Amino acid sequence: MSELPIDFIHCGTVSEFIKSIPDESVDLVLTDPPYGMNYKSREKHIKHATIENDNMNDYFRCLLTDYYKECGRILKVGGAIYSFCSHHHIEFFKKQICDNFTYKKILTWYKNNHTAGDHKTNYAPIQEFIIYATKGEHILRGGFDRDVLAFSKVSRKERKKLNHATPKPIDLLSYLIRKSTDPDDIVFDGFLGSGQTAKAAWLTGRRYVAAELDSDHWMTSMCSVSEAADEEIEALMNETGLTWEQLQDMPEGDNFEVVSIQEVDPMTIPESERDRYFATKKTRIKKQCPCPCHRKRRKT
Ligand SMILES: C[S@@+](CC[C@H](N)C(=O)[O-])C[C@H]1O[C@@H](n2cnc3c(N)ncnc32)[C@H](O)[C@@H]1O
């Protein structure tokens, strides 16, 4: 087995990539595969209105069966999995989870607003499901929580920016990450879409490993985590009044902070080199200059 590529988003199918991940190397699987429901967004501004591999057929069944088996292999003992699904094929997804993990329960994601559909002959859908399971005993962090999670859908404006039919809300993903991991733990998502799981992992101080098949979505996810990394640097520069170069040039000392930076501007990566770069990279920089004059100096 090769080494685990941390803070990395593979561009291509998860099927091969996941096989290169070492046994018991990730702390949490937080994943949102195609639901097998042939989803089609009615929103005109979204170029990718459909989801790749979203038909319930033999290929889909094999892809997902193999995926959950591999997820069971790469998850550490004591880790957990959260897997999104809809009511359409919930029995299929639950079977995959039961075959590879210790099934705990199905959480309900209660959205602020229902999605489109045939509201004349059926009830308007305002919920999706998250199957929660573990590998061995898993301790939930924080206080007592209920199994219905109320989080708003991603706004129309944000959906347009992410150019994805079904992005999941950052605050819901961050909540699940905090419940089941500690800082610096590794979160895996083999169906990353617009990058929300990686961004949530990064924003909560965790690391991520992910894959996305569609190259446009891959680019969106790379840009999204890179942007978040840039915002962290910007905040640090404002706080200290130093430029990025000054921060990096500070002499070695105790008062260092680890931050993530983007390794390269994703838009400049040629298609043939997509698996050469990490989405973000951890680096150590001086948080607070000891010299009082530096502390007051503003960024030029
Ligand atoms: C339900 S969406 C995930 C949405 C994501 N949670 C977000 O917040 O944007 C499922 C994603 O899986 C991707 N996908 C489908 N087949 C795949 C495969 N074999 N390997 C990797 N990704 C795949 C699709 O392109 C799609 O973006």
Image (cartoon, rainbow, N blue to C red):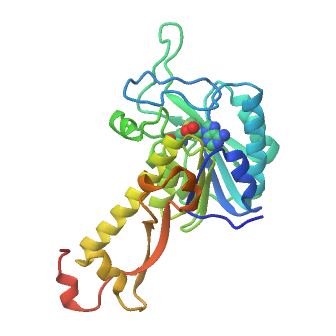
Viewer-nearest residue: 57 or 196? 57
Label total for image: 0
Residue at position x 72%, y 59% in the image? 21
| 197 left or right, relative to 101 | left
Ligand 1 quadrant assignment = top right
Residue at position x 55%, y 44% in the image? 146
Task: Check the image and report above or below for 128 versus 200.
Answer: above
Residue 289 visible within the image: yes
Residue at position x 45%, y 68% in the image? 260
Q: Where is residue 67 drawn, in percent x and y?
A: 73, 44
The quadrant holding residue 56 is top right
The residue sitting at the right extreme is 99
Viewer-nearest residue: 131 or 265? 265
Residue 144 visible within the image: no
Q: Where is residue 199 drawn, in percent x and y?
A: 47, 54
Task: Check the image and report above or below for 291 versus 273.
Answer: below
Task: Check the image and report above or below for 12 versus 199.
Answer: above
| 79 left or right, relative to 169 | right
The quadrant holding residue 259 is bottom left
Residue at position x 62%, y 34% in the image? 34
Viewer-nearest residue: 257 or 163? 163
The residue sitting at the top extreme is 120
Task: Check the image and report above or below for 46 versus 241.
Answer: above
| 157 left or right, relative to 190 | left
